[in-house]
Image (cartoon, rainbow, N blue to C red):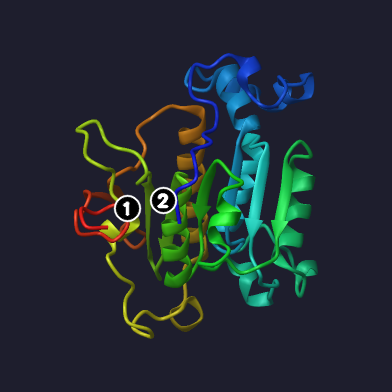
Amino acid sequence: MAALPPRPFPAPGVSLNQCRMTALSPDEIERYARHIVLREVGGPGQVRLKAARVLVIGAGGLGAPLIQYLAAAGIGTIGIVDDDTVSLSNLQRQVIHGTPDIGRPKVESAAEAVARLNPNVRIEAHATRLTPENAEALIAAYDLVADGSDNFSTRYAVSDACYRARRPLVTAALGQFDGSLTTIRAHETGSDGRPNPTYRCLFPSPPPAGSVPTCAEAGVLGALAGLMGSLMALEVIRAIAGFGEPLVGRLLMVDARSLRFETLSYAWDPGNPLSGADR
């Protein structure tokens, strides 16, 4: 399938009238005042946040804090993809949901939580499971994707579709006491003229089925999910507002036991099946 043309969010430095949404209202100026006084964000950066459309994959442990902080930051439109319902065992870490939400679709519960937090944000709920067949159509409607899914098949489907749709991807994963985070912009080239790495450059293929225990089997530290979801939100906000150095070609690894943060560099693999020399 041919790649779709890019539809980037407004780039840093564009005039306000170039954004596809109107300028900030007085209520929004007060709501986002602590952003606006930051030189790295300011009024133009906040307008870019308002103009952006972000697709979040999963409203679980990573997606819950991610959605909350994106909504609080004033992302104009947040799409949420999740086909699951809220269960009691979710509430130890999926803090966007509450006890009264047990049994409800997660997209519905998350949408109501965002409405309470920031009524200026539009939620587009996709109560479905993302698959290789529907991934590109879902992703093409958004400017940036943040993947907080909990399985390898979804992660590979998302990353492949983001490459074909030419969309940036912020992706994270959780272990029992560890987490990782990176940004994929494989449809672009780096300053050296070489293609940026794909997700498959970092992880060429998924592990054998059953070799990695699920969250239900192994457990996960609830506060770690909050930390990694918040870091995902920060990476999304930085990309849209246009400040800082994105985690392109860098994998941030977090060890919750020692509270150690380390960064691993990785590069484009010419043998990868998406953007490799023999693709």
Find residue 142 and report its image quarter: top right
In this view of the protein, which residue sits in the foreground, 258 or 263?
263
- SS for dot 2: helix
Label 2 to label 1, Cα distance in Å? 8 Å
In this view of the protein, which residue sits in the foreground, 209 or 213?
209
**Residue that carries the numbered disc 1 in the rendered image:** 198
Q: Is residue 32 above or below residue 226?
A: above
Q: Quarter of the image containing the N terminus?
A: bottom left
| Label 2 or label 1, whichever comes before in sequence order | 2
Left or right? Give the position of 135 relative to 278: right
Left or right? Give the position of 50 relative to 223: right
* Residue 119, x across and y down, in percent: 79, 39
Q: Is residue 118 above or below residue 42?
A: below
Measuring 53% from the left and 36% from the top, which residue is drawn there?
7
* Residue 74, x across and y down, in percent: 66, 34
The reply to whether residue 37 is in sight is no
Measuring 55% from the left and 41% from the top, which residue is drawn there?
143
**Residue that carries the numbered disc 2 in the rendered image:** 163
In this view of the protein, which residue sits in the foreground, 143 or 178?
143
- SS for dot 1: loop
The reply to whether residue 61 is in sight is yes
Q: Quarter of the image containing the C terminus?
A: bottom left
- Circle 1 packing at 10 Å, graded few (<14), some (14-19), many (20+), is many
* Residue 76, x across and y down, in percent: 67, 36
- Circle 2 packing at 10 Å, graded few (<14), some (14-19), many (20+), is many
Which callout, 2 or 1, points to the residue nearer the camera?
2
C-beta proximity under 8 Å, tags 2 and 1:
yes
Q: Amino acid at mark 1?
A: Thr
Find residue 44 and report its image quarter: top right
Left or right? Give the position of 77 relative to 6: right
Q: Amino acid at mark 2?
A: Tyr
